[in-house]
Image (tube, rainbow, N blue to C red):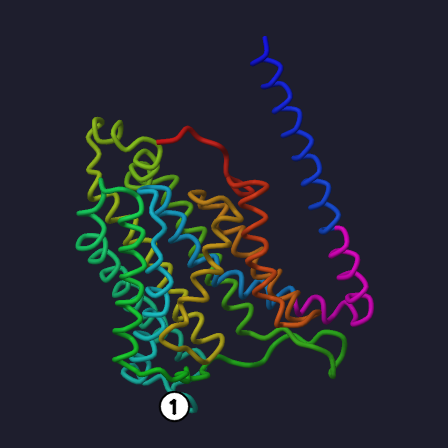
C-alpha cells in the first residue's frame, strides 16, 4: 500500500514537472516567433524569402551529412564521428580533380560544358569517399562490433582525427579556395536593387533533393534496402533469415559516404572555400539535425537537416551570428530533454 502511494506520488510529480517544462518550452518558442515576426516586418518579405532559400541550401548540405549518421546508427547503433571528415574528404578530392577535368575559375570550360565534368568529378569523389568509409568500417569498427559501446565510440573519434591529420598533411592548415565555376545569376526579389536568389542556391537544393529521394526509394524498394531495414530492426533475426549482416553493414557505410562525398563537393561549389577541419563543425551540426529529426530515421534526418539549416540562416540573417552556434546546440539539448526520439522518431525496445 505504501509502495503504491509512493509510486503514485512519483508519477504525479513527474507529470507536473513535465507540464512545467513543456510550458516553458512553448513560452520560449512563442517569444522567439514574435521577435522574428517583428524583424521580418521591418526588413521586408523579399529579404525573408532570400533567407529561407539560403537556409534550404544550407540545410540540404546538412541533410546529406545527417543521413550518413542516421543510417549507421540505425544499423549498428554507432555515432560515426568520422563521418563529418568523410564529408570534408569529398571536398578535398573534388578540389584536386577539378583541374584534371579542365574545370578552373575563369577557364575555357563553362556553361553547359560544365555539366559532364562536374558530374564525373561528383561520381568519382562519392565513390572514393565510400571506399574510404567501408575500409574504416572493416578495419576499425567491425572488430569492435561486440565490444562495449564506449569502445567503438572512442575509435570513431580516433578515426576522425586520423582523417583530419591526413588532410592536414595533404593540403595544409589553410582555407583552400574552391573555384567559382557555377553561374552567379539568379532571381531578383523586390526590384533591381533588392535581394536575389542565386543559381547556386537552387542547384544545391535540387541536387540534394534528388539524392535524398533516390536514397529513400533505394531503402524502400530494393532488396538490399529491405535487408538494411531488417538488420536495423533485429540483427539476429535478419541473420537467421539468411541476410549477410557484414555485407549489409558495409553497404550502409558505403551509401552514407556516397552522400557525404556529394555534400563535400556541393559545399565547396557553394561556399568556394574548404579547410581540413571543416567536417568537425559541419558534422556536429548534422548530428544535431539527425537527433532533431529522429536518429535512425531517414526522413527525419532529411527534415532535421532542412530545419536546422533554416534556423541557422534565420539566426544569421536577423540576429547576431555569434549566437547561431549557441542556438543550434541549445536545440540539441532541448530535443534530448523533451523528446529524445526526435520529431519523427518513435520509442523502441532496448536492443
In the displayed structure, 177 sits above or below 157; it is below
Number of labelled discs? 1
304 relative position to 155: left or right = right
Tell me where residue 18 appears, x and y as whole percent: 65, 35
Tell me where residue 283 appears, x and y as whole percent: 43, 61
Residue at the spot x=49%, y=48% of the render?
A: 291
In the displayed structure, 61 sits above or below 151; it is below
34 falls in the magenta region: yes
Residue stretch in magenta: 30-51
In the displayed structure, 67 sits above or below 175; it is above
In the displayed structure, 308 sits above or below 88; it is above
Residue 229 quadrant: top left
341 falls in the magenta region: no
Residue ID for mark 1: 108
Residue at the spot x=64%, y=70% of the render?
A: 316
Magenta region, mostly helix, strand or loop?
Answer: helix
Residue at the spot x=31%, y=71% of the render?
A: 164
Q: Quadrant of the N terminus?
A: top right
Amino acid at each position: 500500500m505504501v509502495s503504491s502511494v509512493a509510486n503514485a506520488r512519483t508519477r504525479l510529480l513527474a507529470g507536473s514537472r513535465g507540464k512545467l517544462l513543456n510550458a516553458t518550452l512553448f513560452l520560449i518558442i512563442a517569444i522567439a516567433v514574435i521577435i522574428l515576426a517583428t524583424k521580418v516586418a521591418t526588413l521586408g518579405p523579399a529579404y525573408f524569402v532570400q533567407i529561407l532559400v539560403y537556409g534550404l541550401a544550407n540545410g540540404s548540405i546538412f541533410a546529406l551529412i545527417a543521413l550518413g549518421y542516421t543510417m549507421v546508427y540505425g544499423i549498428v547503433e554507432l555515432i560515426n564521428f568520422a563521418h563529418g571528415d568523410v564529408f570534408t574528404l569529398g571536398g578535398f578530392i573534388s578540389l584536386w580533380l577539378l583541374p584534371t577535368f579542365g574545370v578552373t575559375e575563369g577557364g575555357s570550360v563553362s556553361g553547359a560544358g560544365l555539366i559532364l565534368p562536374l558530374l564525373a568529378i561528383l561520381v568519382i569523389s562519392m565513390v572514393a569517399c565510400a571506399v574510404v568509409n567501408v575500409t574504416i568500417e572493416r578495419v576499425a569498427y567491425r572488430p569492435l562490433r561486440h565490444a562495449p559501446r564506449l569502445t567503438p565510440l572512442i575509435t570513431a573519434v580516433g578515426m576522425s582525427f586520423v582523417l583530419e591529420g591526413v588532410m592536414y598533411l595533404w593540403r595544409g592548415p589553410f582555407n583552400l579556395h574552391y573555384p567559382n565555376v557555377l553561374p552567379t545569376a539568379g532571381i531578383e526579389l523586390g526590384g533591381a536593387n533588392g535581394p536575389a536568389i542565386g543559381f547556386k542556391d537552387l542547384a544545391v537544393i535540387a541536387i540534394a533533393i534528388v539524392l535524398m529521394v533516390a536514397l529513400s526509394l533505394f531503402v524502400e524498394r530494393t532488396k538490399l534496402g529491405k535487408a538494411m531495414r531488417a538488420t536495423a530492426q533485429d540483427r539476429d533475426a535478419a541473420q537467421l533469415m539468411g541476410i549477410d549482416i557484414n555485407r549489409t553493414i558495409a553497404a550502409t557505410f558505403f551509401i552514407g559516404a556516397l552522400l557525404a562525398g556529394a555534400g563535400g563537393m556541393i559545399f565547396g561549389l557553394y561556399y568556394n572555400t574548404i579547410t581540413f577541419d571543416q567536417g568537425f563543425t559541419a558534422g556536429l551540426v548534422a548530428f544535431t539535425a539527425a537527433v532533431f529529426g529522429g536518429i535512425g530515421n531517414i526522413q527525419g534526418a532529411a527534415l532535421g537537416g532542412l530545419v536546422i539549416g533554416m534556423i541557422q540562416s534565420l539566426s544569421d540573417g536577423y540576429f547576431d551570428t555569434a549566437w547561431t552556434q549557441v542556438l543550434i546546440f541549445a536545440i540539441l539539448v532541448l530535443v534530448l530533454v523533451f523528446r529524445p526520439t526526435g520529431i519523427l522518431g518513435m520509442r523502441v525496445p532496448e536492443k
